[in-house]
Amino acid sequence: MPRLVSHPDEVKIVTSRFGKGAADIDRFLELGGYESTRKALAQGPEWIINEMKASGLRGRGGAGFPTGLKWSFVPKVSAKPKYVLVNGDESEPGTCKDHLIFLHDPHAVIEGTIIAGLAIGAKTGFIYLRGEYRYLIQIVEKAVADAYAKGFLGKNIFGSDTEFEIIVQTGAGAYEVGEESALMESLEGKRGIPRIKPPFPAVVGLYGGPTVINNAETIASVPHILAMGGPAYAAVGSERNGGTRLFGISGHVNNPGIYELPMGYNLKKMIYEVAGGIRGGRTLKAVVPGGSSTPVLLPHEIETLGMDFDQVGKAGSMLGSGGVVVLDDTVCMVEFALRTISFYQHESCGWCIPCREGTDWLKKSLTRFHAGFGTMKDIDNIQYLAENMMGRTFCPLGDAAAMPTLGFVKKFRKEFEDHLDGKPCPFAKHNAPELTVV
Amino acid sequence: MSTETMSIFSPALAARFDALVLKYPVKRSALIPMLLYAQDEVGYVSDAVMAEIAERLSITALDVKNVASYYSMLRFKPAGKYNVQVCTNISCMLRGAYDLFDHLQEKLGIGHKGVTADGLFSLEEVECIGVCCWAPAIQVNYDFHDDLTNDKVDAVLATYRAKVKEGVS
Ligand SMILES: Cc1cc2nc3c(=O)[nH]c(=O)nc-3n(C[C@H](O)[C@H](O)[C@H](O)COP(=O)(O)O)c2cc1C
Ligand code: SF4
Ligand code: FES
């Protein structure tokens, strides 16, 4: 069972009900639950969207798109039904925050879904969880059933004349299905191949209807924002980055876990104070700041780095999913790069050639490299391959594979060179991967 | 429909499927959950599973197979009673997942996608399972076991062996 951790610097908003039994609907109500939904129902769509815009909340799924703005793009009138879609596919390596939300506070997700539905005029919401999260699906399904029983969902929610239904859906293992249009395909019972954009989901989404898709953490933040007021939520974070974020710190730290910290919190402090520093008193080698697709940062780059979308972007990486992966000086960067690209090679849906072939060639090159068969030309080739994938694919998975690879090669070129000319991996604890795939 | 009487699924699962196809705005949306729940009961996605699901959704069996082959949790041959899935992705790798995977291979005497001779365990190296902060972690069928060491994982295997002995499934 995932352990809860805590640190005095945390600002507990989304996590405020964690560990308090809030998966139980009566307990949730005791803790102030569903008040925001009642408020939203009384105040109406325009008020909700204005509060959301004022909150400065930006999507927690990875791209950081302003949530209020996204909701405002949905046409007011639509011939086809509109939908709210909650993305609980959570598959970016290094990311396990939504896991805790579903486990400890499923009703916050339900509240957020209803409120999003009220804001855009949708009558149906879907909560899609990755298939591996079976026990969490059961928790969410029970929460939804309890909300129906109380009349919070159904034909006349909270005794009003407004209807809202929620359907819980399971995936069956596929990272690419986390991409918004691939998720819609999957929910329609198809392979998780993304759609060409435009049209964007806000106009043509699920079953062809206008659809708002948001990450589970984004949605779980919504009731808290309405409770405390948009401006108060914004004030917690940094400039243009409202509120808090669930940072998942993993890897070589003493106290890994999910910590809720204000946007803009210093990364160095996050590692050394919040997460208790590097395990075994070793030296920090590198940090992957926001899930495996975000380019690696070096120790000197995190000194004054505030963890928000803009500052991490300026530092040449991305805040992504908030999964901070910490590497100490025992890590072989070639092996780490190989494991990273192997994932994207495995998960490429195969539709576009730069992604399908690019990830495959990168994996082959790095496998050979790690085994000591690399040449100087390979290093440039890896860079060339990755550069040529960038921006040439239908969905961002191609970039997600290329960007970290470029980071590893550029920032650790010396370490790649140390593997050349039949030299064994200087860090080898294991035998080099077998060459069967090359 | 005829599947009610001819179903290859248990009455409980067949009833669940009857309800599932009515749950969505479009019937076909039930496809992926149906495949997974069928696999849970039958052990894998067999031709018979695909044929019945196709009939229930009024699509072709080929359509079903085309979708099923996309998703990594779905398999087309039986696994062990307990399918041990070891995450070796980055967060787990940093905390010893490959040692754990090596240890499990040795302990069970099988490799990636292997099944033990008694059919009790199968082993699989998998991508991130969403418990990175509690690494290294494995998933046995749907149960997570985290913060593992070789010793702890031995104890985990022992609990499953004991379950079989006690007949607790
Ligand atoms: C390959 C790929 C995988 C993704 N996986 C996820 C995911 O697991 N969970 C998620 O919330 N967003 C994921 N996203 C981002 C979604 O496409 C989408 O931007 C997000 O759900 C929007 O929600 P937000 O605005 O609240 O962030 C992924 C994107 C890509 C390109
Ligand atoms: S970039 Fe990769 S995952 Fe995305 S559509 Fe192309 S092949 Fe598929
Ligand atoms: S990396 Fe192993 S669970 Fe995420």
Image: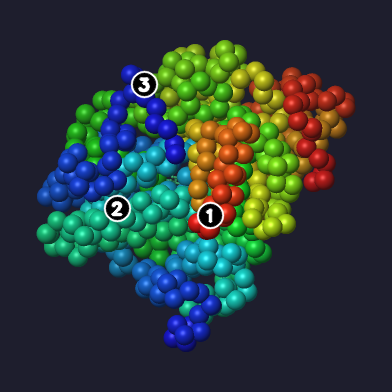
Cα–Cα span, label 1 and label 2: 33 Å
Cα–Cα span, label 2 and label 3: 29 Å
Amino acid at circle 3: His
Read off the residue under disc 2. Answer: A143
The residue positioned 27% from the left and 29% from the top of the image is A234
Residue B168, horizontal then vertical, whole percent = 50, 56
Q: Nearer the viewer, residue B73 or A166?
A: B73
Give the left or right position of residue B26, taking residue A19 as reference.
right
Earlier in the chain: of badge 2 and badge 3, it is 3
The residue positioned 24% from the left and 37% from the top of the image is A225
Crowd class of label 3 (few under 14; some 14 to 19; many from 20; radius 10 Å) = few
Label 1 marks a residue whose chain is: B
Read off the residue under disc 1. Answer: B166
Cα–Cα span, label 3 and label 1: 43 Å
Residue A317, horizontal then vertical, whole percent = 53, 28
Residue A7 numbered tag: 3
